[in-house]
Amino acid sequence: MQKNNEGLNERRSSVRIKTDVRIYYSAFQSKLLSDYSVDLSTGGLFLITNYPFDVVDNLTLKFTIPGPEKKTVSCKAKVAWVNNETNRRKPEYPLGVGLKFV
């Protein structure tokens, strides 16, 4: 496990890069929404959103990986953690959700 700046253990097995990619997503067979990521790794991403997700909610995502090849990815993800106004799990992050690719 890696330690973050506060000395807390994090269960991160891949490197996270800071990037603001537009993420198209849907949940519960609802309409397509879009917001932006804060960071991205092979294991998941953080999505800035005001949508009231709960931990373990499932989403369908579509986004383009930045770079010269600009690969479009469609995948499933689940909400691993929530950063909302009443519970700021990571105060340095904006409101939104941590997503784990499944």
Image (cartoon, rainbow, N blue to C red):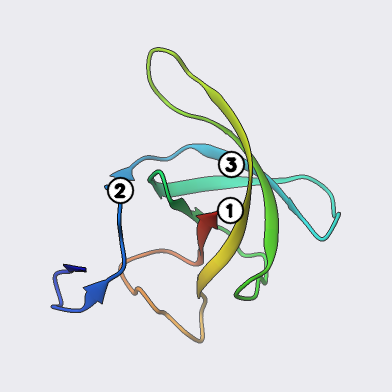
Q: Residue at x 52, y 45 (%)?
A: 36
- Which residue position holds label 1? 102
Give the distance between the C-alpha atoms of the residues marked 1 and 2, in whole angstroms. 17 Å
The quadrant where residue 59 appears = bottom right
**Percent x, y for residue 77?**
61, 54
Task: Determine the residue located farthest toward the top in the rendered image.
Answer: 68
Point out which mark residue 83 bears.
Answer: none
The quadrant where residue 22 appears = top right
Left or right: 50 with respect to 7? Answer: right
- Which residue position holds label 2? 16
Of residues 63 and 93, the one nearer the viewer is: 63
Quarter occupied by the N terminus:
bottom left
- Dot 2, how many residues are within 10 Å of its Cα: few (below 14), some (14-19), or many (20+)? some
- Vertical relation: 45 (above or below) 75: below
- Which residue position holds label 3? 23
Q: Residue at x 52, y 73 (%)?
A: 82
Q: Residue at x 59, y 47 (%)?
A: 35
Three-letter code for the amino acid on which mark 1 is drawn: Val
- Dot 1, how many residues are within 10 Å of its Cα: few (below 14), some (14-19), or many (20+)? few
- Dot 3, how many residues are within 10 Å of its Cα: few (below 14), some (14-19), or many (20+)? some
Three-letter code for the amino acid on which mark 2 is drawn: Arg
- Vertical relation: 22 (above or below) 87: above
- Reading the chain from its start, which is encountered first: label 1 or label 2? 2
**Percent x, y for residue 67?**
38, 20
Give the distance between the C-alpha atoms of the residues marked 3 and 1, in whole angstroms. 16 Å
